[in-house]
Amino acid sequence: MGNLVPQFLLNWIDWGMGVFHSLPDWIQYLTITTWKILFVLIAVILIVAFSTYFERKVIGSMQARVGPNRVGPLGLLQPFADVIKLLIKEVVVPSQSNKFLFVIAPLLSLIPALATWAVIPLNDWYVIADINAGLLYVLALTSVGVYGVILAGWATNSKYALLGAMRSAAQIVAYEIAMGFALVGVLMAGGSLNLGDIVAKQAGGVSHWFLLPLFPLFVVYWISGVAETNRAPFDVAEGESEIVAGFHVEYSGVAFAVFFLAEYANMVLISTLTAIFFFGGWASPFEGWTFLNNIPWLAWLTAGGLHWLFIKMCMFMYTFFWFRATFPRYRYDQIMRLGWKIFIPVTIIWIAVEGAMAWFQVGPWSGLGA
Amino acid sequence: MFQSVLFYLFALIMLGAAGGVVFSRNPVHSVMFLVLTFFQSAVLWLMAEAEFLAIVLVLVYVGAVMVLFLFVVMMLEVNIEAAKRGLSRYAPLGIGIALIMVIELIQLIWLRGQGFSSTGGFAATPEGYSNTKALGAVLYTEHVYAFEIAAVILLLAIVAAITLTMRKRPGIKVQDIAAQVAVRAKDRVRVVKMDAEKKQ
């Protein structure tokens, strides 16, 4: 090591660490937390940027097209071209709109989407705020995100925007209940509100994941998640063929870019949360396959960590795009029927089933008696 | 010290927002001020380390109740002039109610203030103490009847609201979802086999 890195550099690092440790505790804490937040923020924004590229490529190949391939190698710079285009466009504020709410609405939809990352465990030690009520915090923040859409629709002072906002509000309120109930099931299986504990409870390979014992809740949570993010086939809030572009019909330039960022950040978030709640989060599916450890370049398969969370998240992002390329848009009354009359009863029944499973100590509850 | 500065800051914002609910002209602005008020009270509860109550306040009131409020307020065409005329008529009643509430609060604070020192700030909780667990343990054992009764009252409200608003009008066109789902291609499309016709 001493040969690879010159001695004076090591001395500098030592000196830097010494200075850092001599600082008051709260400054150290503040610095580390700020760096943690910055890392997550930049990672999320980069994932959002490349998921737009990924989406266009996936849908392109599903429709037997090429997709973006002009900007940079394989079109990889396309997201940056789009961002620059949006940034230098003019932001038009309609003269009859409510200016303040019109400007603040995109921020109100972006902030909850990013703030939720505070409690998400990326591996067994990387979590910005390891709080007890993490799951409740997630629920609370995802429910706050709807304000951006509603206020945008109202502040625009346009019929189409208001219609989009109304649809979105009714839809999100309906699906939030099913989502909350599905998470009650996760809570019963995990025995904790802390997301890190929920992941730790699922350690030990695929059979220990909550996917199998909570399968109906997984389906409900995942579909409700798609509905909450206003993605196809639940994108009636935008509904191009009926109400132009819904709540963001008058938004242009940066203001539109922020809405766009919020929508994709929410998709990444819902994908990650589904992976955490039902697919073992950062835990490896091959845990316990010890023969894999003998092959040096396959050791990462059995080790849990950020890479597994990332792979699982990408899997769900892919299904988001797959849905969009496959399903036609739901009719509004069908959305309401699915949310209220199917999902909520299914979750309530499965919570009762879980009660029975806990009583007979099967599945995730097998260790309770010990 | 730092904690009390934060407390007064949040409390001030909360009072300002509560004032905004009453004094703003636009009902949508009022609703948004109310959302801010709820948020600030959630923050104050967080400072008191009642994190379960704080987050549930945001979840239930900000995430669900106020969204429906906003929903209704946006649909209403509110006549501001008429509302202002109403203000002078209802002002004495409103002031009376506010006074009663203030007196009750002062009594409560005075009662609780017996033998309480205000220098300590919020009591720190021991390590590993979970607010949620403690609340659940009390709610499902000691107060289980009160809890169940509250649940039944809420259920009653739901049933009552539905029966009040559900009217059976004749001649309404409603889709029969089961019939729609059960339909098969052969019910709708008839495939006819026939020979090709000769061109004239």
Image (cartoon, coloured by chain):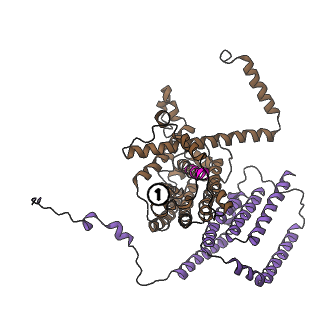
Evaluate whether residue A370 shows in this view: no
- Depth check, front residue: A298 or B172: B172
Whether residue B177 is in magenta: the answer is no
Which quarter of the figure has residue A157? bottom right
In the image, residue B101 sits, relative to residue A212, either above or below, namely below
Which colour is chain B painted?
purple
Whether residue A259 is in magenta: the answer is yes
Q: Position of residue A316 (x, y in %)?
A: 49, 47
- Depth check, front residue: B101 or A241: A241
Q: Position of residue B165 (x, y in %)?
A: 54, 80
Evaluate whether residue B184 shows in this view: yes
Please state which amino acid type lies under the numbered disc 1. Pro
Residue carrying label 1: A216
In the image, residue A258 sits, relative to residue A353, either above or below, namely above
Q: Position of residue B112 (x, y in %)?
A: 85, 68
Read off the chain for label 1.
A
Dominant secondary structure of the magenta stretch? helix
Q: Position of residue A221 (x, y in %)?
A: 51, 56
The structure residue drawn at horizontal position 65% and vertical position 52%, both measured from the top left corner, is A111
- Depth check, front residue: B152 or A257: A257
The structure residue drawn at horizontal position 58% and vertical position 53%, both measured from the top left corner, is A252
Image check: B114 left or right of A142? right
The structure residue drawn at horizontal position 49% and vertical position 83%, both measured from the top left corner, is B167
Image check: B170 left or right of A237? left
- Highlighted range, magenta: A252-264
Which colour is chain A painted?
brown
The structure residue drawn at horizontal position 85% and vertical position 57%, both measured from the top left corner, is B121
The residue tagged with tag 1: helix, strand or loop? Answer: helix
Viewport quadrant of the N terminus of chain A: top right
